[in-house]
Image (spheres, grey):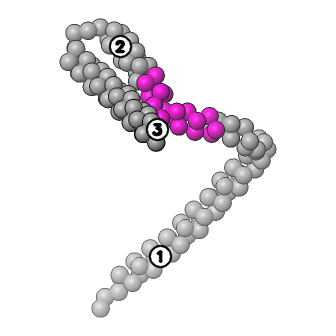
Amino acid sequence: MKVNNEVSNKSFFYEVLKWFCIFLSMVVVFFFVYFCFGFNLFLKCVCVTLFCIFFGIIFLNTKLGKLSVSFLRTAFFEMYKIVWPDKQEVLKTTFVIIFSTIVVSLILFVLDAILVRCVSFIISFKF
């Protein structure tokens, strides 16, 4: 039991150390980009890209990074199981939606015109 607890504490320490490295590297990149105006823009882009790759490598070695990769992998495989509609079905449903939108907008236009006339008629009365 004690050995398992020591391994758990060591694992937790490494996770905290990895996240601290990511945070510290992000702070370094922020200050580099913010305070180094004299550097060439290309050099800044290369440095930021290298640091982002560094962030990614460290992130992928954390527990959260491994869970994220696992989630993305399963989501990618689930995309193959989807039965996508063919072009004809997409066109039919698109035309149905466009037609129903036009009909509903015309109905709302007529109702709005009627209500405007009714309200203007009621307002025009002198009490």
Between tags 1 and 2, which lies in front? 2
As displayed, is residue 55 above or below residue 13? above
Picture coordinates of residue 62 (x, y %)?
Answer: 45, 31
Secondary structure category for the residue under label 3: helix
Q: Which residue is mark 2?
A: 47
Say what secondary structure mark 2 lies in.
Answer: helix
Q: Earlier in the sequence, mark 2 or mark 3?
A: 3
Residue 4's label in the rendered image is 3
Using the numbered discs, state the Cα–Cα distance from disc 1 to disc 3 in whole angstroms: 75 Å
**Magenta highlight on residue 80:** no
For the point 68% across and 41% down, the residue is 78
Identify the main secondary structure in magenta.
helix
Up-down relation of residue 71 to residue 35 (above or below): below
Judging depth in this view, the residue of 12 and 67 nearest the camera is 12
Q: Is residue 24 left or right of residue 6?
A: left
Position of residue 102 measured from the top left corner of the image (x, y, whole percent):
62, 58
Give the residue at x 74% y 42%.
81
What is the distance, in whole Å, between disc 2 and disc 3 at their CAs?
A: 41 Å
The nearer-to-camera label among 1 and 3 is 3
Q: Amino acid at mark 1?
A: Leu
113 to the left or right of 101: left
The quarter holding residue 118 reads: bottom left
Q: Amino acid at mark 3?
A: Asn
